[in-house]
Amino acid sequence: MAIRRIHSGGAFEPQVGYCRAVVAGGFVHVAGTVGQGDTVTDQCADALSIIHAALREAGADWSDVLRVTYMLPDREEFAPCWPLLSQTFGAHPPAATMIECGLIDPEYRIEIEVTALLPG
């Protein structure tokens, strides 16, 4: 089975030793992704943009996402992200989990991880 690694050039990738996504066995596994911005919705939108770029490079799109995990230090900040997430996944919502936990840096307010099935 061929394995393909997708790098986004993020600062943490070489520092921690991971890549943005791994394509293997017909699946795309996108690493937990944080975004930049002042608000949780800004960070959510930026993280989704980074994830979408990885999905597209792998040959997938939002409609191919099977599972998503949201991680937030403050669960109260999840609700403002719902409209953005609903718009992103549209008629193809994935199975989802939200976890309240600490993130790698206190400036980050949401981290998003997805798994997609390659079309075809």
Image: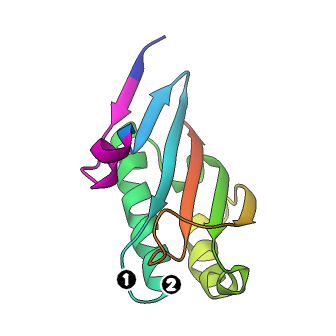
User: Residue 58's image quarter?
Assistant: top left
Is 54 covered by the magenta stretch? no
In the rendered structure, the answer to whether residue 48 lies left or right of residue 93 reads left
In the rendered structure, the answer to whether residue 1 lies left or right of residue 72 reads left
Residue 90 visible (yes or no): no
Vertical placement of 41 versus 118: above or below? below
**Looking at the picture, how far across and down is residue 85, in whole percent?**
60, 73
Check whether the beta carbons of the residues at disc 2 and disc 1 lie within 8 A of each other. yes
User: Residue 111's image quarter?
Assistant: bottom right
Q: Name the residue under label 1.
A: 37
Residue occupying image coordinates x 46% and y 58%: 33
Magenta residues (range): 4-16
In the rendered structure, the answer to whether residue 67 lies left or right of residue 52 reads right
Residue occupying image coordinates x 53% and y 55%: 62
Residue occupying image coordinates x 55% and y 72%: 110
Q: What residue type is labelled 1?
A: Gly
Dot 2 alpha-carbon crowd within 10 angstroms: few under 14, some 14 to 19, many 20 or more:
many
Vertical placement of 8 versus 21: above or below? below
Residues 15 and 80: in front is 15
Q: What element carries label 2?
A: helix
Q: Mark 2 points at which residue?
A: 41
Residues 40 and 14: in front is 14
Residue occupying image coordinates x 31% and y 46%: 15
